[in-house]
Amino acid sequence: MGKSSKDKRDAYYRLAKEQGWRARSAFKLLQLDEEFDLFNNVSRVVDLCAAPGSWSQVLSRVLIKGEKFGRAAWQDREARFRQQMLSVLPEEFSAGQKSKLDEDLLQQEKELKPRKDVKIVSIDLQPISPLAGITTLRADITHPATVPLLLSALDPDYDAHKDATNSNQTSHPVDLVISDGAPDVTGLHDLDIYVQSQLLFAALNLALCVLKPGGKFVAKIFRGRNVDVLYAQLKIFFEKVVVAKPRSSRASSVEAFIVCINFRPPPGFRASLEEPLGVGERLNRMVVERERQKPIIAEVLMQDPQAPATWSAAPVPPTGPAGDEVTEIEVYDQTEDTTRDCNQDIRWIAPFVACGDLSAFDSDASYQLPEDYVSLDPVQPPIAPPYKRAIQMRAAISGGPQR
């Protein structure tokens, strides 16, 4: 399959090369920003699993260069539309006022507004081609030694040996932590979903060390049967948790993005590398502490208030033969069974949101290219592709030249 056929089959792959993005995944972050305004009041960001650097490239162009994409570009289009609506009302605005408004609007669109005190750190196990103004680290986010490297990159004065009690915390927290990482899929969906969830926990452990209260966390997930448990665990640390599916993400893919807004750790919580999330029983204790903070609402009793016991019923699976319509009911006494959780059948489900303009390209559709279309080369070829070592080993065995 050549480049031209891929341009026809994947519109976002073609647009990424035409607009100068390193990978088509840049559109996923831009469409997430359109929906959630991720870059609002953001100047310090950590990009995990960043290679080849398309999300870092978006951060560089938005925060450092001051270009407008995503929500900011959408707001400019809305302002231009309102300006066009005003131009059809000649009785209210003179020609000079209209022209001045048009000039002001065009000037605002062309004006670049770089942000102050921008700090962006990108981490990946694979090498990343340098980007202006971005600190890149080649490290494994699942390894504990990566946290001191990240804290040192965020704060040049950081000293892990100076204060052992605060060695896992930064004095200059960040506003946003993003992660577009995913494991090499095996085709076994249950295994892939589990490995992806552990990668997300590794990203969350880093985020808890550097994220400031009120910050945001965005990470890729694989949707599966029990992924709602992961959503509920994230809800412990963030006020709002939403599952988003950008239009540039193929509908045939199980990937989605979890968007966590307003970081609010439980009282007394401190990130610890000795007990990372996803390991041990500390998370269960945190859930219990969170439940204790909720207001207690007395249940309304529908029976006689002088009755000695409160009776409740819970359906159990029928034990009769196939086709038996008899339903057995298990009756238990709440006054005697005090250990049973009244809310154990209540399950919190994260809302699901589709991001991106409905008029945008469909990532699963093929589009006809013009006859004079010329396929472009990728903006950033792979520095160390996974197949490079295999080619070198095969060339060494055959005695041919190594490329």
Image: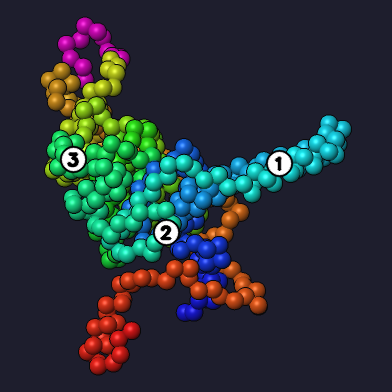
Q: Position of residue 167 (x, y in %)?
A: 18, 40
Tell me where residue 125 sits by quadrant: bottom left
Residue at 59% x, 68% y: name it: 367
> Can the viewer see residue 91 in this picture?
yes
Looking at marks 2 and 3 on the same chain, the residue that comes earlier in the sequence is marked by 2
The dot on residue 185 is none
> Can the viewer see residue 241 in this picture?
no
Q: Residue furthest bottom?
A: 399
Tag 2 and tag 3, C-beta contact below 8 Å: no
The residue labelled by disc 2 is 131
Q: Amino acid at mark 1?
A: Asp
Say which of 125 and 292 sits in front: 125
User: CA separation, marks 3 and 1?
Assistant: 50 Å
Q: Position of residue 356 (x, y in %)?
A: 53, 50
The residue labelled by disc 3 is 167
User: CA separation, marks 2 and 3?
Assistant: 29 Å
Crowd class of label 2 (few under 14; some 14 to 19; many from 20; radius 10 Å)? few
Tag 3 and tag 1, C-beta contact below 8 Å: no
Residue at 64% x, 49% y: name it: 110
Q: Position of residue 263 (x, y in %)?
A: 34, 35
Say which of 150 and 35 sits in front: 150
Residue 189 vertical position relative to residue 348 in the rendered view, above or below: below
| Magenta residue check for 345 | no
Residue stretch in magenta: 300-312
Q: Position of residue 206 (x, y in %)?
A: 26, 46
| Magenta residue check for 304 | yes
Say which of 354 and 385 sits in front: 385
The residue labelled by disc 1 is 104
Q: Residue furthest front?
A: 157
